[in-house]
Image: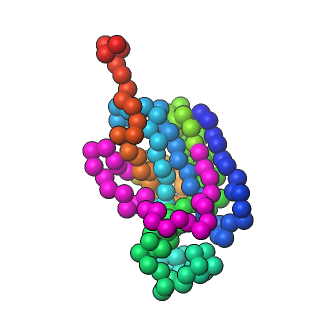
Amino acid sequence: MEINIVAPEQDLPLERAYVVNMSIKSFKGRKNVEVHLFRGEWDPGELESYDWTAILGKSHQEMEEDDKDAVRVIMEAFTRSERDQLVQYLQNRYAGRLTAIQSAALPFPVPSGIAPLAAMPEDENMGRIRLEKVPNYPLDFSVHGFYDLSAHPPILRDEQF
């Protein structure tokens, strides 16, 4: 399994700035399925604790809908400590099932119009994995993963050659 953690290129305006994705070797009949991981929930008090004017250039009251999506994207991100815990968990629990784990910092300012992963629809191709539902889940924060099966090739059986 390849692990690629990219250091931020700039000083980050807050600690909650890291995104993580993993590639699953085989998932729902597809190979090398990329899953974008994100925090499934957060304390509303944390949302109020940040200086959004410094982070996004607007106060919470001045924000438009695109800005509120940027806030949700940030709240879905992990702190460095959470990222490290998550990567360690994935290495320990799923090493044989994953081809890669990747992480990088969000770009700041967060681009306008970016959609939070929790807002992505679920259908026959797109869905969510809820890691905290797995027995003996050890982390103290929930982690969800968004995937799109249509972006990955199917696994071919020997008889199809």
**Left or right of residue 54, residue 147 in this image:** left
Residue 109 appears in the figure? yes
Depth check: give the residue in front, 104 or 9. Answer: 9
Q: Residue 65: image x %, image y %?
A: 41, 75
Residue at the front extreme of this rendering: 112
On the image, the x and y values in percent for residue 123 come to 27, 49
Q: Residue at x 65, y 70 (%)?
A: 14
- Looking at this view, name the residue that lies furthest to the left: 124
Image quarter of the C terminus? top left
Q: Is residue 29 above or below residue 132?
A: above
Name above or below for residue 94 compared with residue 63.
above
Establish if 74 lies above or below 49. Answer: above
Name the quarter where the N terminus is drawn: top right
Q: What residue lies at 60% left-to-right and 61% top-to-bottom? A: 107
Task: Give how far across and how far down residue 104 sits, in percent.
Answer: 62, 53
Magenta-drawn stretch, dominant element (helix, strand or loop): loop
Magenta span: 102-128
Does residue 114 show up magenta in the picture? yes
Viewer-proximal residue among 9 and 103 = 9
Q: Determine if residue 82 is in view.
A: no
Of residue 17 and residue 78, the one placed in the foreground of this image is 17
**Residue 34, image x, y percentages:** 47, 42
Question: Which residue is depicted at the point 54% across and 75% down?
Answer: 46
Please tell me whether residue 74 belongs to the stretch shown in magenta: no
Residue in the image at 57% along x and 42% along y: 101
